[in-house]
């Protein structure tokens, strides 16, 4: 492995150490409905996001709220610090499609309608505003 690749890999590894991730798989809610809430909380302060999810009337908000609380607990265990002191924000929220249960419903005149019960995978990544971003610096010697 070349020096430039190794340095870039180490920089990515260090950046990952400063973040905290929580995942939920096979959540029985449509990905489209979950993405509506994920777009609202992306980039927000953690406590602001929790307030939004707590008072939201959507069904998917309960699942996202539990996952965000899990990510907060993961942060506390990983860094041995309180959440209030670290100025956390929701860095990334991914909602991916998961398995689809396919069913048939009887319809008039001997037909059948297809029902697709969708589910999704969610991952939330938290980061702190206090920690400096890892910036990859290149010099003229490395480029030549």
Image: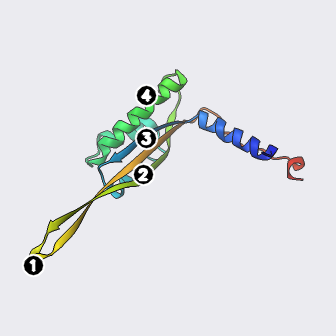
Confirm whether residue 136 shows in the render: no
Residue 10 x/y as whole percent: 71, 38
Q: Secondary structure at mark 2?
A: strand
Q: Secondary structure at mark 1?
A: helix
Question: How far apart in space, not on screen, are marks 3 and 1 (Cα)?
Answer: 45 Å
Residue 95: mark: 2
Q: Residue drawn 39% across and 33% down?
A: 69
| Crowdedness near tag 1: few (<14), some (14–19) or many (≥20) residues, C-alpha within 10 Å | few
The residue where tag 4 is placed is: 73
Question: Could you tell me if the residues under marks 2 and 1 are in contact, i.e. CB atoms within 8 Å?
Answer: no
Residue 22, above or below 82: below
The residue where tag 3 is placed is: 23
| Crowdedness near tag 2: few (<14), some (14–19) or many (≥20) residues, C-alpha within 10 Å | many
Question: How far apart in space, not on screen, are marks 3 and 2 (Cα)?
Answer: 10 Å
Question: Could you tell me if the residues under marks 3 and 1 are in contact, i.e. CB atoms within 8 Å?
Answer: no
First in sequence: mark 3 vs mark 4:
3
């Amino acid at each position: 492995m070349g020096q430039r690749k190794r340095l870039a890999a180490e920089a990515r590894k260090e950046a990952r150490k400063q973040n905290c991730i929580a995942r939920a798989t096979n959540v029985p809610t449509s990905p489209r409905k979950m993405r509506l809430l994920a777009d609202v909380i992306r980039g927000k302060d953690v406590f602001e996001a929790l307030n939004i999810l707590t008072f939201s009337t959507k069904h998917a908000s309960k699942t996202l709220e539990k996952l965000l609380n899990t990510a907060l607990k993961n942060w506390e265990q990983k860094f041995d610090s309180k959440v209030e002191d670290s100025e956390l924000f929701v860095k990334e929220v991914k909602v991916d499609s998961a398995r689809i249960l396919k069913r048939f419903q009887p319809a008039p005149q001997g037909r059948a309608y297809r029902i697709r019960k969708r589910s999704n995978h969610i991952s939330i990544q938290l980061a702190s505003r206090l920690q400096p971003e890892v910036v990859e610096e290149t010099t003229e010697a490395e480029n030549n």
